[in-house]
Image (tube, grey):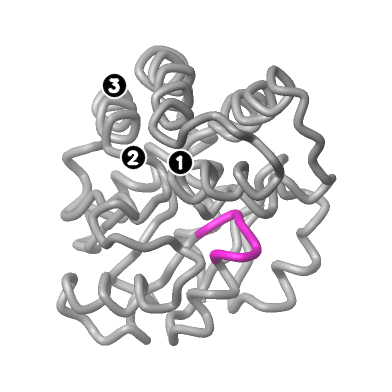
Amino acid sequence: MMKYTTYLFDFDGTLVDSMPAYVSMMKQILDENNIAYGEDLVKIITPLGFKGTAKYFKTLGLTMPEDELLEKMGAYAYHEYVYHIPAKQNVIEVLKELKSRGAGLHVLTASPHVTLDPCLKRLDIFDLFENVWSCEDFGTTKADPAIYRMAAEKIGKPIEEILFLDDNFNADKTAKEAGMPVCGVFDESSAEYTEEIKAITDYYINDFSELLTLN
């Protein structure tokens, strides 16, 4: 018997192994413009999406107009997501198994649809999800507790019955504050925050296959 029948998945670093490409792309933009950044850059920008990250880059001193910055981010990202970024280990098999057991699967990510949808379609898992949402669909970010409540409302289930999975500390913490049960997901990009994530989540998985035996 499955403990949860409704799942809300992050995308980057949870379903797909995109964080190395995502992080290097964002750092490249800052490096090209000689902008200094702290060691916590990855932790800060991961839940923000392109628009949130662009605003954050402005606070670091980047003077490029926001629309130009977003265009550059999109161009760098598009090629990677459409052609190269792989699913993480066991993700495809586990999603198919959960679906076959009757689970409702949904995605909520900071990534825009322009990269999100083609990537999921190339991996042949887009159709497994009832909803594939980008933060842009809600007009806010995963740093805002309201986004999780809005997602629950659209799914049509009580928030406490939807298991949220994310590799990012800030997103996990915010979803938990919003009232969702949370499962932390190991990703190399957030490995140094593993213990912090474990401390604030209900569950933690190192590999997606562990999801099938969650209790």
Disc 2, disc 1: CB below 8 Å?
Answer: yes
Disc 2, disc 3: CB below 8 Å?
Answer: no
Kindly report which numbered mark, 2 or 3, lies closer to the viewer in this rendering: 2
Look at mark 3 in the image and give the residue it sits on. Answer: 122
In the image, taking residue 161 as reference, residue 175 lies left or right, namely right
Residue 68 shown in magenta = no
The amino acid type, in three-letter code, at marker 1 is Phe
Kindly report which numbered mark, 3 or 1, lies closer to the viewer in this rendering: 1
Q: Earlier in the sequence, mark 3 or mark 1?
A: 1
Q: What residue is rendered at 53% in x and 75% in y?
A: 174
In the image, taking residue 124 as reference, residue 51 lies left or right, namely right
The amino acid type, in three-letter code, at marker 3 is Arg
Residue 66 lies, in percent from the top left, at 45, 36
Region rendered in magenta: 166-171
Within 10 angstroms of label 3, few (less than 14), some, or many (20 or more) residues?
some
Q: Gap in Å between the C-alphas at discs 2 and 1?
A: 8 Å
Q: Which mark is residue 112?
A: 2
Residue 169 shown in magenta = yes
* Residue 160 falls in image quadrant: bottom left
Within 10 angstroms of label 2, few (less than 14), some, or many (20 or more) residues?
some
Within 10 angstroms of label 1, few (less than 14), some, or many (20 or more) residues?
many
Q: What residue is rendered at 73% in x and 46% in y?
A: 41
